[in-house]
Amino acid sequence: MGYIHCCGALHKTKTFRIVPQDDFVLCEADYLAKCPVCGHTVVQLTRIDKNDNISVVRKINKKAKSFFQKLKTMILYEIRPINYNVINHGSFYLNYNEFGVKKRCYSNLNALKIGLAENKYLKLNP
């Protein structure tokens, strides 16, 4: 999913990979059906050539609709983002630290020494 800058903000668009022509290596088209602010239809074609030069063609409203109709015949596929859902995570919180003070602890539970009293003469490693 790409973004197009319109009306001072970035708006999510549908992104399509297009068959590269001439000396271009990569061609992508971003299509915004309707800007939520101004209501314009925007199509932006981005191309990269062999020398890593970028060329951008941008059309708005009627010209954008006719330009996208021409590009439809050259579309290979639509680029869709992968949805990363974090499933394996716990929700346990230890609400006390090693000195009995109530606080949330998100760190490693093995490092905590629960029940320790502050003692300057205590030797942990004899």
Image (tube, rainbow, N blue to C red):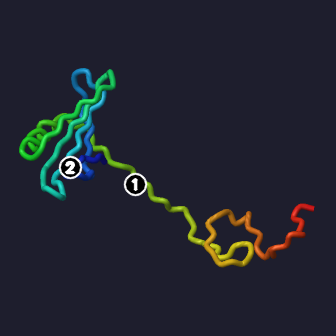
Image quadrant in which the C terminus is located: bottom right
Between 104 and 12, the one lying in front of the other is 104
What amino acid type is highlighted by mark number 2?
A: Cys
In the image, taking residue 44 as reference, residue 80 lies left or right, namely: right
What residue lies at 25% left-to-right and 35% top-to-bottom?
A: 46
Q: How many labels does the image show?
A: 2
In the image, taking residue 52 as reference, residue 113 lies left or right, namely: right
Mark 2 neighbour density, 10 Å: few (under 14) some (14–19) many (20 or more): some
What amino acid type is highlighted by mark number 1?
A: Asn
Label 2, on which residue?
6
- Residue 18's place in the image compared with 49, above or below, is below
The secondary element bearing badge 2 is classed as strand
Label ID, residue 83: 1
Where in the figure is residue 122, as x and y percent of width and height? 88, 69
What residue lies at 32% left-to-right and 22% top-to-bottom?
A: 50
Mark 1 neighbour density, 10 Å: few (under 14) some (14–19) many (20 or more): few
- Residue 74's place in the image compared with 8, above or below, is above
Q: Residue furthest front?
A: 120
